Amino acid sequence: MDAELLELARQFESAQQAKSSIRLSERNVVELVQKLHELHIIDFDLLHTVSGKEYITPEQLRHEMMLEIKKLGRVSVIDLADITGVDLYHVENQAQRVVSGDPSGLMLIQGEIISQSYWDNIAEEINERLQECSQISLAEIAANLNVGSEFVASMLEARLGTLVKGRLEGGQLYTPAYVTRVSAMVRGAARGVTVPINLSLLWGTLQQLLQAMDGAGGVATESSFFQSLFNGLAKEGEILGSLRAGVHWTPTNSFISYDTLQKLGISQPVQFLQSRYAEGLPLVTAFAHPSMIEMLDAAVEDAIDRSSWIDSLSVLPSSFGSQDASKILSHCNSVQSALKDNKGMILGDSYVLSNGFIKDVYGRMEKELEVFRLSGSSGAIPSDDIHLVMEAKGRTDSGRSGEVNEKRKKKGKTSGARTEILPDDEEIVPLKSKKNQRKGKEASLVLSDTKKASKKDSTRMQEDDLNIPSDDWIMQKILNLVPDFEEQGLEDPQTILGPLANYMRPMLISSLKEKRKTLFTENAGKMRHLLDNLQKKLDEAFLNMQLYEKALDLFEDDQSTCAVLHRHLLRTIAASIGDMLFHNLDMHNKLKNGIDVEESPDSESITLGSAERTALAKSFPGSLSKKALAVVEALEGKRVEAFMTSLREVAEESGLLLKKLDKKLERTLLHSYRKDLISQVSAETDPVALLPKVVSLLYIQVHNKALQAPGRAISAAVSRLKDKLDDSAFKILTEYQTATVTLLSLLSACTGDEEDCTSDRIASKRELLGNLMPALKGFVLGTTPS
């Protein structure tokens, strides 16, 4: 076998290499093919190509045409003629045979061959666009595809429900959601009509409404579409009434009020209607057809699906009340299903709120609550919340003052001598004879109600102390977050805001307390460390304050000097103590409320203004705020005693202890203060700064008192030392004090010009003070108490 193949290959090679003895031209070949065709040696049809250099069989032409159709899906006969290189006449003839013989359903339309796969792809594209736009016009599709609208309609009808999810009506293609939406509008409009009407007017109104909702880009909805939906609803019994001539609609009311029947002389309207309409639903004020339940059920189901809310009274006739709405809601399947599956809830008789809507509002309310917690703990309550907080506290305080009775009540007979003091919130009910036992029981009920009211007031007081938001605050925030409650024309938004706030408030308070508890636990160590440091600083500062206060007694006979000394001590030492205390208490309050703050390295150096102290005092909780404001007021006052008293009250309220200055501590502090002053006087080189230190040291040496005197009181303080010092020492002190006052006066009057004559006098006074400094230091540092 291999030998034979090799022989054939050899012969084929030699045949290829052999040179032909006869060479045929193209014309000879054409004539040869024609002769073979005449002799029926070639017994099949042959077609010339346009170039004339090639032959092609009809079968091959059809095959090549099919390949192009499968590849493109839609191809013109003219394009096929160019592609195959065959005359258009032959391509058109073969196109008819291709279309008629293809089982897949090829179409020849206006000189184009279109496959079904092409229409499937077009249908998918139309469906994608339809889902985006809700509706598409067939004329627009036909124009884009360059085919007739009737052909597009027939193509889409075969694919509706499969490749195209929509409804074809009146030359428009709609999505099911759009159809449902417009059906609901038609149903609502038809049910809202109470008098005979021409439906064309109703469709015109709905068209305007749809155009307003869809905007300028929306496609106008045909009246035939409305009419088709209307006919379907009427056939299904969803709207009741009679239709004449296709356009004149006379509605049948789906309810009748009891007042109407009573005016007709029917005394028992419920029984009368139930005997004739067994399927009807008796309400509080009217008798309703089951279609009313179906209408409300559809509206509620839509609201639940959209995670929204609905006021059922907005769907029902205007004559219906909240009790009627509540009864109809109890018969709605969607409502019962939502309540069972925890997908919604009923508030205020007529409002249905989806669980998704409530969760969304609650989530945003938690963020508002976090702002409230942070602002409330720092005292910076937002301006739009201040009036709500003040109103809530005002009502609580007025109710509390009106119910508290602090008088003592007597119990027993009027002639008896025994009396008993009862709690302030209880009312005395005197015991009387058996005839009045019934009155006694009624009085005991009054007492029980009083106790309950007192318990509520106590709860409110606790909530005020814990800075818990009031109902008014929650309702206002909900209204800000959900403006629909006000924008949808509710006559009284409080009818929904009140129940919703009552539902959310316990959860919000629980969340707030839980956060505070967690953060309080986390900050417990910082709070303990902060209070320990504050106690140490306060011990030292308050003892020094008591030490300086004792020196004020020396000037009680000089009212003007005494007032200056009091004010100086309040503006300096007392203000420093108050600022340190307020700053640390504010940090403690923030930590207690879960705000992470960094402890200041040196809180003693913090200086606050009067407005800052007042703001901090108001931010403190409960009675501490009132007592802190008393400290602020005392710092602005004229007596140190008032500050000391108010400071003790604040410290006691804060759980801090203030040490009382005893004799032993006083001697220790005076000794330490004296050593410090001696060191300062010895090292002082400034002649002006030396004088107040010398005076303070002399008062310790002479009176054993620590005097803090401003410049205005130095003269009076020096004059009181006249009888306690030697004449020579007192003369040096007075000369030094006079020269210091003169120097300060010259310095204040000096303009700084080179030609100013006061510069020489200033230099002269400085020289004089410099000469007196050694003598002053010498007698002060060597003086012993006389």
Image: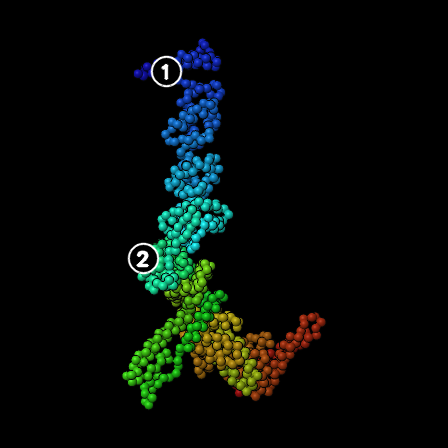
Q: Which mark is residue 9?
A: 1
Q: Residue furthest right?
A: 755
Q: Few, some or many C-alpha atoms within 10 Å of disc 1 (few <14, some 14-19, many ≥20)?
A: few
Above-or-below relation of 286 to 548: above
Q: Residue at x 42, y 67 (%)?
A: 470
Q: Nearer the viewer, residue 541 or 510?
A: 510
Q: Residue at x 47, y 72 (%)?
A: 617
Q: Quadrant of residue 465?
A: bottom left
**Disc 2 to disc 1, C-alpha distance:** 106 Å
Instruction: Residue 661 in the image: state x and y as whole percent.
Output: 45, 81
Above-or-below relation of 451 to 33: below
Q: Residue at x 47, y 79 (%)?
A: 644
The local secondary structure at tag 1 comes to: helix
Q: Few, some or many C-alpha atoms within 10 Å of disc 2 (few <14, some 14-19, many ≥20)?
A: few
- N-term mark: 2 or 1: 1
Q: Which mark is residue 276?
A: 2
Q: Nearer the viewer, mark 2 or mark 1?
A: 2
